[in-house]
Image (cartoon, coloured by chain):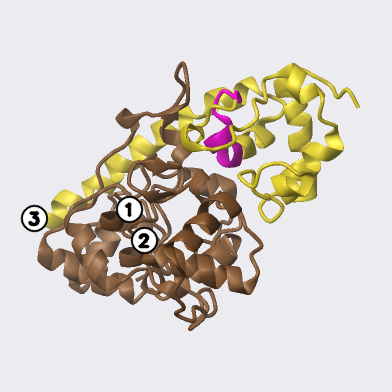
Chain colours: A brown, B yellow
Amino acid sequence: MRLHLAVALSLGLLAAPSWADGGANLLISQCASCHALEKPQDASLDRLWKRGGPDLYFAGSKFNKPWLVQWLQNPVRIRSAGELYRKHVKGSGQEDVIDETTLTPHVRLAKAEAEAAADALMALSGPAGLVEKNAFKGEKVSTAMGAMFFGKLRGCGACHMAKPGSGGASGPELYTAGERLQADYLYSYIKNPQKFDPRIWMPTLNLAEPDLQRLTAYILQLSAKEGK
Amino acid sequence: MLTRTITSIPFLAGLVLAVQFAGTGQAIAADEPFAATARNYDTYCTQCHGINRNGRGINSRDMSVQPRDHSDAKGMGGIPDSELFRVIKEGGLAVNKSVLMPAWGNVMNDTEIREMVAYLRHVCKCGTDN
């Protein structure tokens, strides 16, 4: 898959090639206009404002495939204020509110297409070392301890929801993170979000190793069912 | 058939994005000559401090400590530039304030943070009392 081809296809200049395999073809025709399938050369903030959705060039190191297959068939919003949130927020008499008129539904795939696309996405592992292999040691953390760390001690709930309807709206919901994300990705992203994009709006928390393990464990343990 | 149909969707999506992107330029234009800093503020700060810089961001509803109202001349006037710089770079805990204000020193460099301090003075229409 080559970037110039993806760009040409995204602009509607070319029909999707008949030689391409199903999954890669789907990524080029359906995903490339909004998501980077190769590491972008442009690391500017302007690119983040212009892109239509999160980068996918490391999707194979980020997502759990079963979740991808399900989500691509039934794509529900993960970031309640969209991405990037600022483009989908408007003022009100009180707190800013989400401007739903600016948010568009994600492409929905049939089962066979979703499986093919998920296969192709899982092949996009990203640059070596971006996600630290075996970084998460698999420890468990008590819900009470984890919740205190997530909320009061580190303030993650300012931007993220640990249970449906409660918490911040600018970041992705985290009560589905355990199903959605690989543990080592979660660890690596929390450790240094700017390693993934130098201008991303998730701050670096400068956590010590035990705290990184603890926070990763807590987020992986969250689930929408238990959070209600 | 599916392929022919979907190849037009990205093009339309691109047009929609272009319109949305253009629409976000209004606030920035009003903040000239702070355009680049206002873009940083829009990206990193508005999620809590609000698109009107009034502390009422999309995340503020459930926050245990409410974000500072940057349009409040009296409140902002009591904070020295050095403290504003440090709280942006190192986070709220560095100045004995809330952990909900994170450290942005890994995203913005010192020059950008200094420009942000100047921009906050522009927003609050206040100098510093200190």
Amino acid type at circle 2 is Leu
Residue B13, x across and y down, in percent: 31, 42
B2 magenta-colored: no
Secondary structure beneath label 1: helix
Quadrant in the picture for residue B69: top right
Left or right for A54, reference A112: right
B53 magenta-colored: yes
Residue range in magenta is: B43-54
Label 1 to label 3: alpha-carbon separation: 43 Å
Q: Residue at x 58, y 32 (%)?
A: B66
Q: Residue at x 47, y 25 (%)?
A: A95
Residue that carries the numbered disc 3 in the rendered image: B1
Q: In the picture, which quadrant includes the C terminus of chain B?
A: top right
In the foreground, A34 or B3: A34
State if disc 3 and disc 2 touch (CB < 8 Å).
no
State if disc 3 and disc 1 touch (CB < 8 Å).
no
